[in-house]
Image (tube, rainbow, N blue to C red):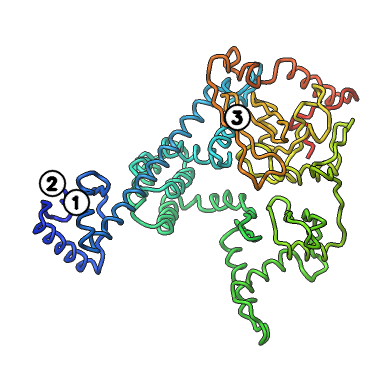
Amino acid sequence: MEDLFEYLGVGVALSAARLDEIERELEVRADAAGGLFPPDPRFDPDGGEAADAFATLASRSPYAALEHELARAHAALADANRAMASHYEALRRAFDTAQRHPELYLPERYQRTDAPTLAARALATELSMRLGLPAGTLRSRAAEAKTLYDRLPLVRQRFLDGIAGAADAGAAATAALAFEAGDPRLGELDESLSSVIGTVGSTRFRRRIRAVLARLDRAGLEARHARAHADRRVVVEHADDGMSWVSLFVSSIDATRIEARLDAFARAPHGRDEQRTLPQLRADAAVDWLTGTGTATAVHTEVIVTIPALGLIGQSDALAQLEGVGPIDDATARRLFDEAPSFRRLVTDPVHGAPLKLDRTRYRPTRAQRVWLALTYGRCTRPGCDRPAKSCDLDHLTDWALGGRTDDDNLAPACRSDHVVRHRTAFTIERRADGAVEWRSPSGYSASDPPPGAADGPPLRITTNDRSPRSRAPGGGGPAAESAPPPSSAYFAARARAERMKATGESSPPPSSSYPDTPTF
């Protein structure tokens, strides 16, 4: 017990007199610190006898109670940082393994030079299914972990020790990419950043990064800006209550100009009856300018809203759905219906609400099928991917070259990246009787999102990890026939034959549906 409260500079014995003495010491320390004193990360308030002692103190002193919670918060954050660092390291090692052993994800016949890259994409797809995170996010984390491992060992160690967080470690890794591997300036960058990471806020740490890069590589400032500027983009993120965020990644000069114009408009006189706040005026102006409201160049795009007919007159409990977003309120739905210059009637089964089956005899889906399947699924069918269905390819679940038809039951949205993985690796997919599309990785892990029309119900997810001997095909290329086998050699031969016919202009059979030669949606 003698060093239980060593960080206070006192010994501890759980007598009433000693507790009184410690309480007075806590109050003195708190007064000296302006009412609070910082938690010491060496103290673990959940550590058995120490926790009992501190709980006793906390019952007698508000300062001790506060210190107890501050120390717990500090320790928990360090634990979270260490856990995230372990997550990054595991991703790095997993991607390294997949790239060194592409046969884990690819068919045995695949001998092209891009095998390691394709295997890494397949691994990212499986990790996305397992973790529920975007594949791109997981690839980025693995790349950052590799950069820290190869170029910034001191920063990496601060991350592993729980001192630095993932965001700051990632920013440091991005900065290290300004130099070639082996550049002696990396050592100075590592020392400079590791000395402050985790001890200052993220904003100040990023300023430190910019200052160090400018000092170490002044000549590269222009090139770095050009690379970053090439990545400019607009991102739309749907939030709750019928609202969304629209973000622009543009140059700092352009961002300053945008901010200045919006601010000038918001602060200009708008009449005595104007009730909107400055933030509301800025937002409304941005919407009007981007959509061209009231101008000859106003945008005219198709925004798909599914509105139950009976709901327009208040006779249905079904909610209107904005494609790719989700439910919207009845008042907004009625307003959109009133303002729509035209509308399309989608015919469904009057009892089940399911699309009427249209057995197609041609390869390419019709526009009506594309619209219907986008509305039906909403998103890419691969669990973990949130790409809107309207921007996905339409994938033949049973390949056209193997007898699959262009029928609603044999088509499902798959984003371009997942379409590649599905057709060029040993992933398999299957449409279940309830309409859900189940994806299965070569490791035996399978998952599916809820079936169409069940988005508001409990998630239907199959999570198996069958690693028994019978679950692997000979040679380790994928699951065996008993558990969703990978495409057979006949499958790839049929696809290759169809691709050759397409390349030579032969008219029969129709082209294979495999991406990227013939994307269909």
Q: Quadrant of residue 108?
A: top right
Crowdedness of circle 1 by 10 Å Cα count: few (<14), some, many (20+)?
A: some
Crowdedness of circle 3 by 10 Å Cα count: few (<14), some, many (20+)?
A: many
Numbered label attached to residue 446: 3
Numbered label attached to residue 378: none
User: Of marks 1 and 3, which one's residue comes earlier in the chain?
Assistant: 1
Asked whether disc 1 touches disc 3, contact meaning CB atoms under 8 Å apart, the reply is: no
47 left or right of 374?
A: left
32 left or right of 81?
A: left
Numbered label attached to residue 53: 1
Q: Which residue is mark 2?
A: 1
* Mark 1 to mark 3 CA distance (whole Å): 49 Å
* Mark 1 to mark 2 CA distance (whole Å): 9 Å
Q: Amino acid at mark 2?
A: Met
Q: Nearer the viewer, residue 66 or 176?
A: 66
Q: Residue at x 86, y 53 (%)?
A: 344
Q: Secondary structure at mark 3?
A: strand
Q: Amino acid at mark 3?
A: Ser
Residue 243 is at least partly visible in this image: yes
Q: Amino acid at mark 1?
A: Ala
Q: Nearer the viewer, residue 72 or 424?
A: 72
